[in-house]
Structures are given as C-alpha cells and as structure tokens.
Image (cartoon, helix red, strand yellow):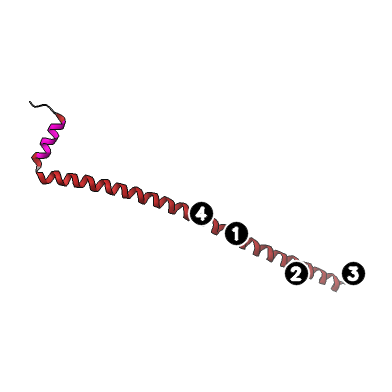
Amino acid sequence: MIPIEEALSLVRQAAAFFGTAAAVVIGLVAFLGGLFAKRVLQNERAAIEAGLLALGHELGLVKVTFEKQRDLLTDDSQKGPRSNYSYCQQIIRPWPL
C-alpha cells in the first residue's frame, strides 16, 4: 500500500502539472486570439477606409455638378427674370406665334 504522504505528493504534482499546462494553453489562446482580433480589425478598417474614399469621390462629383448648376442659374438670374421666361418659352414653343 502507498503511504498517504506519497499519494498526496503525487496528487499535488499532477495538479501542478495540469495547472501549469492549463496556464500555458490559456496564455497561447489569449495571444493567438489577440492576433486574430487585430487582423480582423485591420481588414475591417481597410474596407471602411475604401468605402469612405469612394464616398468622398462621389461627394466631390456632386459638389462640382452643384457648383456648375449654381453658376448657370446665377448667370441667368443676372440677366433678369424676363430672359429666363423667354428662354423657357423658346424651349416650349420654338416657333413664333
């Protein structure tokens, strides 16, 4: 029969071994999980930045179009309201009455 002290020593050694192994596994899982999370965040950030660049380009196009239309309206309004009316009449009825 094994003495009680020897059995307790064996149990303590097994617990220490499994505790150390569990700590190592937990440490590795945390490290690899952190790497994976950083990689996913990096990919998401790149996708969002690409989308923002596309939206910025689209906004620039809209701004240019708006400025051109504003300039055209400003030029027409400086000629007076009668010129806009006559221009519209020419578009609607190109022939004289």
Q: Earlier in the sequence, mark 2 or mark 1?
A: 2
Viewer-nearest of discs 2 and 1: 1
Q: Earlier in the sequence, mark 4 or mark 3?
A: 3
Per the image, the residue denoted by label 2 is 16
Label 4 – label 1 distance at C-alpha? 15 Å
Label 3 – label 1 distance at C-alpha? 44 Å
Quarter location, residue 65 = top left
Q: Earlier in the sequence, mark 3 or mark 1?
A: 3
Name the main secondary structure of what is drawn in magenta: helix
- What's the amino acid at mark 3? Ile
> Which x, y percent locates residue 87?
13, 36
Per the image, the residue denoted by label 1 is 33
Magenta stretch: give its range.
83-91
Taking depth in this image into account, of 31 and 56 the one nearest to the observer is: 56
Residue depicted at 47% across the width and 55% down the height: 45
Label 2 – label 3 distance at C-alpha? 20 Å
Per the image, the residue denoted by label 3 is 2
Q: Earlier in the sequence, mark 4 or mark 2?
A: 2
Q: Earlier in the sequence, mark 2 or mark 3?
A: 3
> Which x, y percent locates residue 43?
51, 54
Q: Quadrant of the N terminus?
A: bottom right
- What's the amino acid at mark 4? Asn
Label 4 – label 2 distance at C-alpha? 40 Å
Q: Residues within 10 Å of mark 2 (few under 14, many from 20)?
A: few
- What's the amino acid at mark 2? Ala
Q: Is residue 17 left or right of residue 58?
A: right
Q: Residues within 10 Å of mark 4 (few under 14, many from 20)?
A: few
Q: Helix, strand, or loop for circle 4?
A: helix
Per the image, the residue denoted by label 4 is 43
Q: Helix, strand, or loop for circle 3?
A: loop
